[in-house]
Amino acid sequence: MRVSQVLKAGAALTGVVGVAGMAAYALSRRPYLREVAPGLRSPVLYLPMHLLADATFARTSRFFASIDFSRPMRHAVDVTEFSASFDGHAFSARVLTPRGATAGAAASGPRPVVVWTHGGGHLIGGPAMYDPQNARMAAELGAIVVAPRYHKSTQEPFPADHDECYAALRWVQEHGDKLGGDTSRIAVAGDSAGGGLAAGLVQRAFDEGHPVRALGLVYPMLDHRTTDKSGAVGQFIWTAGPNRGAWSMYLGDDHLDVDLPPYASPATRSDLSGLPPTWIGVGGIDLFCDESVAFAQALDAAGVDTTLDVWAGAYHGFDQIKPTAPQSRELIDALIDHLRRHLESHVLREVKR
């Protein structure tokens, strides 16, 4: 047999083995995929995130940590960028302001402000990626959305991102009128790692005497102690291994063995009393479902006005993967409804009486 024939036969065999391997992998995922809500199924769910070693994603994320891009927006907003500093901490932010009169506020009056902290495991992402959602929030609430940029943990670990985002929040509280904002009507919200950031910001703001009106958490990354789950829970998009690696990059390899500084892992806070009305939305097969439920229960036990919504068969980031699915629309509807209830002017007047 000629060498060329041997090479061709070897290539053909390799192809057959490869196809067989992919078929076997696909079959192995079927039991988990059956637990995904039909409208949320996607080829993206076959990505083998669950096979990654703990540190793999965290280490490779440094090569695309700064990637940020805007997606088309369906709502009329003006988008600007600005930089400032507060208490010695510099920050920059993306600002979305609705055009004209909206359902949430008159065009001429001061608007409520939502400080949005984006997700990405403290490793990747940027505020522009959330333009479609944030534009909708701005338009439907008649609010200004301020979305800070922050250093990723591969660049600077905690508390760098917390300090930058807290500086943005405090600047908005003290100087938000320069953006056309009503500094008495401020809420904080975020998703995934940004949800954890949002929770920590609100805790610190309360501790330092600068409380906000409301907190909205979308499948938040709250607890550095998250463990492996059973069944389909935590099998898709953001899985236990990358999550462990992300926390280690953020807080250090010894984070499970040392006392953490305040606000680093918001679920570990012992006294939750006095925190603002909080809404949490999460998927039933999200890696963060258990900790979201536990945090909601702890808030409720502490007397905090708390709402928890769980979507059956929904995985981490489902609204980004399938944005037109009913569950995805319901998630953002619920977040906006929560913020609207607590940012309306009459709510503020009732609290002041």
Image (cartoon, grey):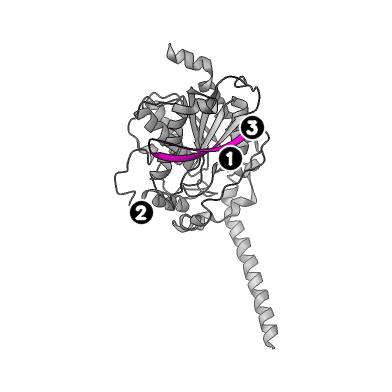
Residue 297, above or below 49: above
CA distance for labels 3 and 1: 13 Å
In space, the residues marked 1 and 2 are separated at their CA atoms by 30 Å
Identify residue type, mark 2.
Asp
Q: Earlier in the sequence, mark 3 or mark 2?
A: 3
The answer to whether residue 175 is visible is yes
Amino acid at the residue labelled 3: Val
Which circle, 3 or 2, is nearer the viewer? 3
Q: Nearer the viewer, mark 3 or mark 1?
A: 3
Query: How dense is the environment of label 3, judged by Cα within 10 Å: few (below 14), some, or many (20 and up)?
Result: many
Rendered-image quadrant of the C terminus? top left
Secondary structure type for disc 3: strand
Q: Nearer the viewer, residue 22 or 302?
A: 302
Q: Residue at x 37, y 38 (%)?
A: 263
Q: Which mark is residue 77?
A: 3
- The answer to the question of whether label 3 and label 1 lie on touching residues, with beta carbons closer than 8 A, is no
Image spot of residue 238 (x, y percent): 51, 48
- Residue 41 position within the rendered picture, expressed as x and y whole percent measured from the top left: 63, 46
Of all residues shown, which one is farthest toward the top?
Answer: 353
Q: CA distance from mark 3 to mark 2?
A: 42 Å
Q: Nearer the viewer, residue 118 or 311?
A: 118
Mark closer to the chain start, 1 or 2: 1
Q: Nearer the viewer, residue 212 or 338?
A: 212
> What's drawn in magenta, residue-wise?
77-94
Residue under label 1: 130
**Which of the 4 quarters of the picture holds residue 266?**
top left
Q: Residues within 10 Å of mark 2 (few under 14, many from 20)?
A: some
